[in-house]
Image (tube, rainbow, N blue to C red):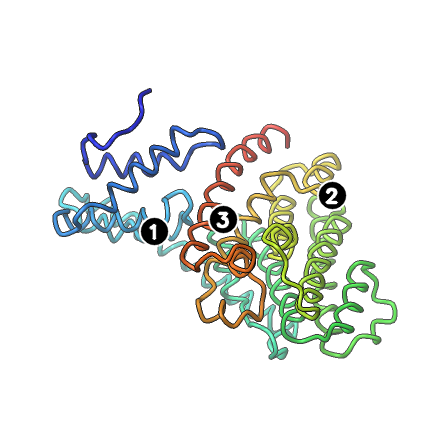
Amino acid sequence: MGTFNDSLNKDVKGLLGLYEASFHGLEGETILDEARNFASKHLKDLNLDEVPAILASHMSHALDMPIHWRPNRLEARWFMDMYEKQGDMIPSLLRLAKIDFNLVQSVHKKEVSNMARWWVELGANKMTFFRDKASGTLFLVLLTGFRTSIFSLQEMTTKLLCMVTLIDDVYDVYGTLEELELLTDFIVRWDITDIDKLPPTIRDSFMALYNTTNEIGYWMMRELGINTIPYMRKVWADECKAYIKEVNWYNKGIKPTLKEYMDNAVDSIGGLIMLLGSYFLTTEKLTEEGLDYVSKIPSVMHCSAKILRLNNDLSTSSYELARGDNFKVLECYINETGASEEATREHVWHLVHETWSTHFLGSRLFSALV
């Protein structure tokens, strides 16, 4: 195949197709990198006033984020609006899509109600120091698996992620260094003996984490016939060790390098807990061999958590970046290189795409091995 050049026809649909396809490349497939650079350059150079409105919307949508990086259910909702404006739209097909979307949405409303009830029964709504994100967390989980037949997965994963938010905020905004070191020791040992040594609010937070994780582990043991609690304990321990390292950096005025930060931040984002729980709940037949494999965090899991961390940090505002009260990948790169914020965001976006390429390869290997 020859190289791409500027003399190629600037057909918008063709450029869009080329641009979207280029994101399916694996690491090292430079011809697809070249295709993406070529397509994105010419799409950005087009005068939107000369492009039909619907096509211009598709262009803006694609350049903001490629289609296969987007949550399918939200993408379906966006596409229905676009499809309705097309001249060759089939009314019955659109009506069927809307009915399907609304039926699934009605089930999700019941799920939100169930999770809100659990949240109140847990007593988490009284812990005012942290983010009350039960409904938002369920929404995030539903984006990864919206089928109504897997509510157990959605419910259990939502509970795990709610615990991530709770414990993250204990470390970020509530506990002192001494209190958090003690809490980390309790979580690593997974032992409630002498739990009253913890301050009341931190004690209650740990008990919520402890009971929720054990409840999910017991459900899996009963339904799936295998004990997953030791694996969940380990990933929680790794998560909280990452939290306490960040607390120590902040308290000691240490500015980590980008590599130091990312090596730790992949654990502290909470993605590995969600992925491990999802694996437990969606695998038809859990085995000790499979559990041992995923507990070592294969590439597909590591890359997924890394992408989550990078995208999370990219959402940091300029104001938050200037304030610098929480380490982010942007701040670490700026401190290390002296780059501008714009150049830093461009670099981090490149890291996201680079990790996606590795993620595709890891996904194929994971499917073959597990």
Q: Earlier in the sequence, mark 1 or mark 3?
A: 1
Q: Is residue 258 above or below residue 121?
A: above
Q: Nearer the viewer, mark 1 or mark 3?
A: 1
The residue tagged 1 is 64
Q: Earlier in the sequence, mark 2 or mark 1?
A: 1
Q: Nearer the viewer, residue 6 or 55?
A: 6
Residue underneath mark 2: 225
For the N terminus, the quadrant is top left
Pick whichever of labels 2 and 3 is earlier in the sequence.
Answer: 3
Image spot of residue 24 (x, y percent) = 42, 34
Assess disc 2: are there few (<14), some (14-19) or many (≥20) residues with their C-alpha within 10 Å of its C-alpha. Answer: few
Q: Which mark is residue 99?
A: none
211 vs 73: above or below: below
Judged from the image, the secondary structure of the residue bearing numbered disc 2 is: loop
Q: Position of residue 144 (x, y in %)?
A: 49, 49
Q: Quadrant of the C terminus?
A: top right
- Seen as rendered, the residue at the extreme right is 194
Q: CA distance from mark 2 to mark 1?
A: 44 Å
User: Label 1: few (<14), some or many (≥20) within 10 Å?
Assistant: few
Residue 176 occupies quadrant: bottom right
Where is mark 3, residue-wise?
A: 145
What's the distance in space between the residues labelled 2 and 3, CA to CA? 23 Å
